[in-house]
Image (cartoon, rainbow, N blue to C red):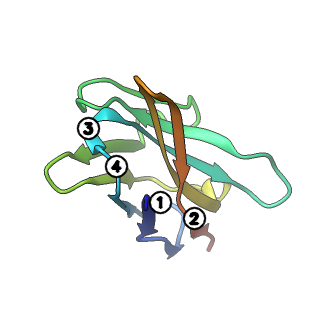
Amino acid sequence: QVQLVESGGGYVQPGGSLRLSCAVSGLTFNSYTMKWHRQAPGKERELVATIAGSGVITNYADSVKGRFTISRDNAKNMVYLQMNSLKPEDTGVYYCNALGFLWSGRYEYWGQGTQVTVSS
């Protein structure tokens, strides 16, 4: 059974920092691209950051470039999102996502989400 469990969300003032974690089990972790998405109230879910299976290649939404850093530890089956210089517009539910293209097909899994609130 595949599980993605996010943690680390919370309430922070503008300019503050948070580190989100996602613990992954039940799949061959380094075969999967890992992503963080977020969904603000009343808005569609948006892709925030992506990291390839090797951890070498990363991509970010323009809105978070220079402020957020995605990383992974393939030995621990963990993916992280370090969020600095947080803004109120970063508020939302943050979801961990695993995407794999294996010989047997395309596989995609989601976590349950963790709430991030940036407010003074």
Q: Which residue position holds label 3? A: 30
Residue 73: x and y in percent read 20, 48
Single out the mark in the foreground, 3 or 2: 3
Residue 94: x and y in percent read 57, 58
Disc 2/disc 1 C-alpha distance (Å) = 22 Å
Disc 3/disc 1 C-alpha distance (Å) = 33 Å
Q: Residue at x 60, y 38 (%)?
A: 47
Q: Is residue 42 left or right of residue 72?
A: right
Q: Residue furthest right?
A: 42
Circles 3, 1 touching at the beta carbon (< 8 Å) = no
Q: Which residue position holds label 2? A: 113
What is the crowding at mark 3: few (fewer than 14 residues within 10 Å), some, or many (at least 20)? Answer: some
Circles 4, 2 touching at the beta carbon (< 8 Å) = no
Q: Which residue position holds label 4? A: 27
Quadrant position of the N terminus in the picture: bottom left
Single out the mark in the foreground, 3 or 1: 3
Q: Of the two numbered discs 2 and 1 on the same chain, state the one appearing first in sequence.
A: 1
Quadrant position of the C terminus in the picture: bottom right
Disc 3/disc 4 C-alpha distance (Å) = 9 Å
Identify residue type, mark 3. Answer: Asn
Disc 3/disc 2 C-alpha distance (Å) = 21 Å
Residue 19: x and y in percent read 36, 62
Q: Which residue position holds label 1? A: 15
What is the crowding at mark 4: few (fewer than 14 residues within 10 Å), some, or many (at least 20)? Answer: some
Q: Of the two numbered discs 3 and 1 on the same chain, state the one appearing first in sequence.
A: 1
Q: Is residue 45 left or right of residue 79?
A: right
Single out the mark in the foreground, 2 or 1: 2
- Residue 116 lies, with reference to residue 46, above or below; the image says below
Disc 4/disc 2 C-alpha distance (Å) = 19 Å
Disc 4/disc 1 C-alpha distance (Å) = 36 Å
Identify residue type, mark 2. Answer: Gly
